[in-house]
Image (spheres, coloured by chain):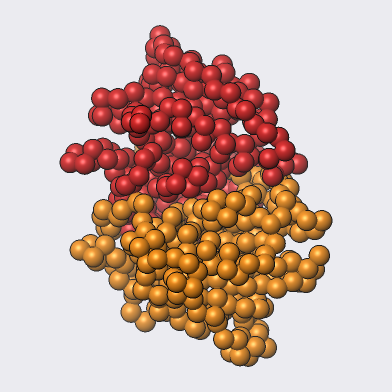
Amino acid sequence: MTEYRGVMVHAEVAEGKLAAIATELLGCGRKLADDLGEELSAVIVGSGVSGSAQEAFAFGADKVYVVNDALLQDYRTDTHVAVMEKAVRQAMPSILLLGQTSIGRDLAPRLAFRLETAATMDCIELAIDSSSKRLLCTKPVYGGNARAAFISEVEPQIATVRAKAMTPLEPDSSRKGEVVAIEAGLDPSAVRTKVTEKVKQEVEGISLEAANVVIGGGRGIGGADGFKQLEELAGMLKGAVGASRPPCDNGWVPDVVQIGLTGKIVAPDLYLAVALSGSSQHMAGCSGCKNIVAINKDPEANIFREARFGVVGDWKKVLPAFTEKVRELLAE
Amino acid sequence: MTVNIIVCVKQVIDPEAPPSSFKVDEASKKVVPPAGVPPVISPFDENAVEAALRIKDAQGGKITVLSMGVNLLREVVKKPLSMGADELVLLEDEAFVGGDSWANALGLAMAIKKIGQYDLILCGRQAADWDDGQVGSGIAEMLGLPSVTLARKIDVGDGKAVVERVTADGYEVIEVSLPALITVSNELGEARYPTIKGIMAAKKIEPAVWKPADIGLEPAQIGAAGRKISLERLYQPVHEGKCELIEGESPEEAGVNLALKLREQKLL
């Protein structure tokens, strides 16, 4: 019987390039593989994705498995689970890492169950346990109120990793490795879902994930009009506007600007949280924020436990004066 | 077509309880339920119940609610009935406690097999306790069904469901053949409130209570004994909690002082 060995990363490709999460997984996978003294491989699944193999080497992979097939153009559970099962059975990695993305959230559990195990989802720390040599997976639980560390008793040990939790290596384009093509071998009649439409809910301006300044609004903003004030400030600071869940649920802002456990993960230098209580679920999306600044009328609000600077007061009075002063300072 | 729907719901510690009331017992690796805060149905599971009710409203059908655990408070697990669901099955036994996603999916999948008739199985996208989001996909895999996760809208007809699935920058529309399993996200919309009539009707519905043997499982396969993933440690992250409050004679002045402070700190 072949032994399970090595670390494998499921590397997503977006718009012809390795997705940011893939480079983060490779950075983390490289360290784990080195700690074990084993190989790091990447598996790239899609249509027209073969060109991304070199990029995976540059970011740390020793070997790249490519499953390239027109049927893999769209992510679909049935097709992607089938080819990933094939890749895992061929490569026999001891550890398999995926991104906690809209693909990874769907793919990892279904793949794990097909391999007769379960995954550990949304990890923020991964390490090789010194005594057991198993993968120790740490993830936020209870909406971020607690953290739990898990060890899988079954091979392969599967985990998904939160965006921005890991650091990519500096790409080294001179790194080389072995490319292994895997036949998809899919039966189109066995695919039970069909993607009929993809809808992008575009938000103007700088993307939340890339912004250096994020202005977040909460339930206390009270309506779509209030968010216009946040937009104005964001425009001045070349930042992006996000929100906790209530403004999205109430339709004040589009769902795609939700920051938190089930929304976007942001990591700006400055996060200005306005009329936002700072629930654990929301803060789960802010763990990478370097400086959190809060304006909230409730001195007991959880956001003040997370913030570096804060003002206790009604945002409707504080924010316009703040915005005017910022305008003045930026004009100097 | 009238639609037979099974909705899986989980009773959890209220995630809206104040963070300051949240306590962990590190020795037993368990969360201490906050005093005086009753448990609730996990919020995404309520979204799943709402999704089921909308389908039933549109074309008729039967909704069976399935829950697993111990000390399932009837006023909690009957809430979906008071919202308009029809039947309740409880997997209630000490043996079901302490499972991971694998063990929990196995118990639910075997119960769904016993219920037998279904076109659609709905789950919340993830439970508010372990935030895992695996059990729905796991049930589908164990039952050999197609699955679609993170639904924000579900339409059923012609032996298929048309699902809007939430993605990072919008959504995709997916057609899936039935029977299928779908997990539901909050973007679907808030769950309706129970009506007085619904609450009265729910009082009269007796849940079916099943033990592991009733669904063909040994205690060793489920709960803590059936885990694939072991919990090594459970703890609360440390909050540094050193917020510097910026003050002023008026809220406006505080706003101005905040801008000056951020400038001084080179954050603007």
In x, y percent, where is residue B105? 48, 59
Which is nearer the eye, A206 or B222?
B222
Which is nearer the eye, A318 or B232?
B232
In x, y percent, where is residue B212? 44, 70
Chain B tint in image: orange
Q: Is residue A73 visible?
A: yes
In x, y percent, where is residue B205? 60, 86
In the rendered image, the vertical position of residue A108 relative to residue B8, given as above or below: above
**Quadrant that contains the C terminus of chain B:** top left
Q: Residue at x 57, y 86 (%)?
A: B206
In x, y percent, where is residue A265? 47, 44
Q: Residue at x 62, y 73 (%)?
A: B64
Chain A tint in image: red
Which is nearer the eye, A174 or A280?
A174
Q: Residue at x 73, y 48 (%)?
A: B175
Q: Is residue B261 visible?
A: no
**Quadrant that contains the N terminus of chain B:** bottom right
